[in-house]
Image (cartoon, rainbow, N blue to C red):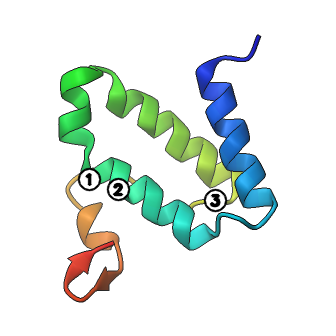
Amino acid sequence: MESKSEKLWGLLNEGFRSGLITSYQMTKGFGRVAESMEDLRLDVPDAEKQFEYYIEKAKLTGWLDSSFGIGPTTKSSFVKENGINV
């Protein structure tokens, strides 16, 4: 039986492979998770560790640029639209 993480990865992979999810959308989505990391840590203590695993996997798959990462510089690395991080 597939684990939840395998199912999630399969869904993202199918969306990306079929063109339903673009690289920009993938980066934007991962960025939003990164921006929410403080709150996520309250409910999932190892959220950052799990997320870092998915970031590395996404980089290897070609979904994310190799410069993508979480931390103090993450928020400023996103494209801004109307002065708002996206």
Looking at the image, the residue that sits furthest to the front is 20
| Residue 53 visible to the viewer | yes
Q: Where the C terminus falls, by quadrant?
A: bottom left
Q: Within the image, what quadrant is residue 5 found in?
A: top right
Name which of mark 3 and mark 1 comes first in the sequence.
1
Helix, strand or loop at disc 1?
A: helix
- Residue ID at (68%, 27%): 6
Residue at image point 32% right, 71% down = 77
Query: Residue visible at 51% across and 46% down?
Result: 55
Query: Image quarter for residue 4?
Result: top right
On the image, numbered disc 1 is attached to which residue?
35
| N-term mark: 2 or 3 | 2
Residue kind at label 3, given as amino acid type: Trp
Circle 2/circle 1 CB separation < 8 Å: yes
Q: Which mark's residue is nearer the viewer, 2 or 3? A: 2
Q: Which mark is residue 63?
A: 3
Identity, as a three-letter code, of the amino acid under mark 1: Glu
Q: Residues within 10 Å of mark 2 (few under 14, many from 20)?
A: some
